[in-house]
Amino acid sequence: MEKNLISGEFFNELIKRAGDIERTMAFSDGNDHRLIKALDYFMDKNKSNYILIGDENKMLDNIKDAGIKNTDNFMLVDPRNSKRFEEFREIIKESFIKRNKTLTDEQLKINTLNNSYWASVLLKNNEADCAVGGSISSTADLMRAVINVLGLLPGRKFLSGAAFVDVPDCIYGLNGKFCVTDPAIIPKPNQDQLLNMVLSSYETAKSVFREEPIVAMLSYSTWGSADGEEIEKIRNVVEIIKNTRPDILIDGELQLDAAIVPEVAKIKVPTSIVGGRANVLVFPDLNAANIGYKIMQRLAKADVCGTVVQGAAKPFNDLSRGCLVQDMVTLIAMTLLQTKGLEDSRQSN
């Protein structure tokens, strides 16, 4: 595996920081040959234990093809012939019952054979600290397993997504570094979902950035330059957070230039504590967030990492099915940092 696989100082720094965070990680798409290459690279920097879920023969072939000799920190799990199939089946069944849902025997069998559900049970049982999937399976598949089996963090009602971008030669944000939400999960968030999204993104950014997250609620309006139902929703969320979480630096509604460009902020929002300084960008809906961060990636040549799934009881993050090996490495590192951040947050509360 090439030594300089990861481009960008920011993501290389994250991988270095994650090196000391040794946990047990589950990978629901263990059949993916790209994953084995990513772990081959990451293993030199981190001594975590890796549970790979998939077809055992395929996983063994991929490990052999990658030239990995030492597999002491690997555990291969094939749900189809696992001795724990009935045990996991009952856990999944009980999880659905607690959510007032019923499954036919055939549906229950299908879910128990599903790698995302298997990983969620490992997380629920505290046999894994965090998980990564999505490189073969769909986002919807992963989300269903998280919601139905793993569950949500205390105080969270919804899952949401975040991505991190590092724009080269950029003076805005944290020298071009931003947390962007939600580019993947909630299409059109209502007020409660938007509130949860902000709280989760703040915690995620706090675990990744070495500086305080500064949150901007983005809009086509800045401080009343326009009105409408969507803008009112943003204002309500800002007011709620200012009243309930005064430790969070947040403002809105703000246009993007007012949020990140100091010169514009001085004109449009001269008294804002966020204007011109924001590093967490909360877009009003999935359309805007997804387009926005991909514009940064393609036109500004930003390095990106995501999707970080927020709000789950334990981190279970979602790769793109078109991801590269380096994308896997950065999200694995990000997942460990997120795990450590949640652990620290629990201890302080």
Image (tube, rainbow, N blue to C red):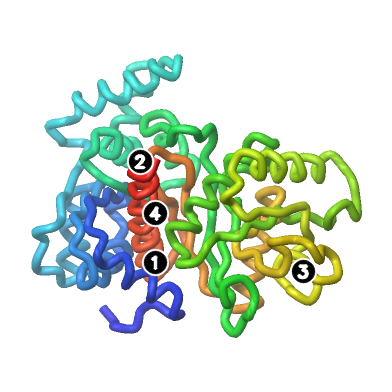
Cα separation, mark 4 vs mark 3, equals 29 Å
Name the amino acid, label 4: Gln
N-term mark: 3 or 1:
3
Name the amino acid, label 2: Ser
Judging by the rendered image, the residue that carries numbered circle 2 is: 116
Vertical side of 108 occupied by 279: above or below? below
N-term mark: 4 or 2:
2
Judging by the rendered image, the residue that carries numbered circle 4 is: 338
Residue in the image at 36% along x and 42% along y: 346
Q: Which label sits in the foreground, 2 or 1? A: 1
Give yes or no for contact between labels 4 and 3 (Cβ–Cβ under 8 Å): no
Q: Position of residue 193 (x, y in %)?
A: 62, 37
Judging by the rendered image, the residue that carries numbered circle 1 is: 330
Judging by the rendered image, the residue that carries numbered circle 3 is: 257
Give yes or no for contact between labels 4 and 1 (Cβ–Cβ under 8 Å): no
Q: Position of residue 125 (x, y in %)?
A: 24, 33
Residue 256, located in which quarter of the rendered image?
bottom right
- Label 2: few (<14), some (14–19) or many (≥20) C-alpha neighbours in 10 Å: many
Name the amino acid, label 1: Thr
Vertical side of 271 occupied by 342: above or below? above
Q: Which label sits in the foreground, 4 or 1? A: 4
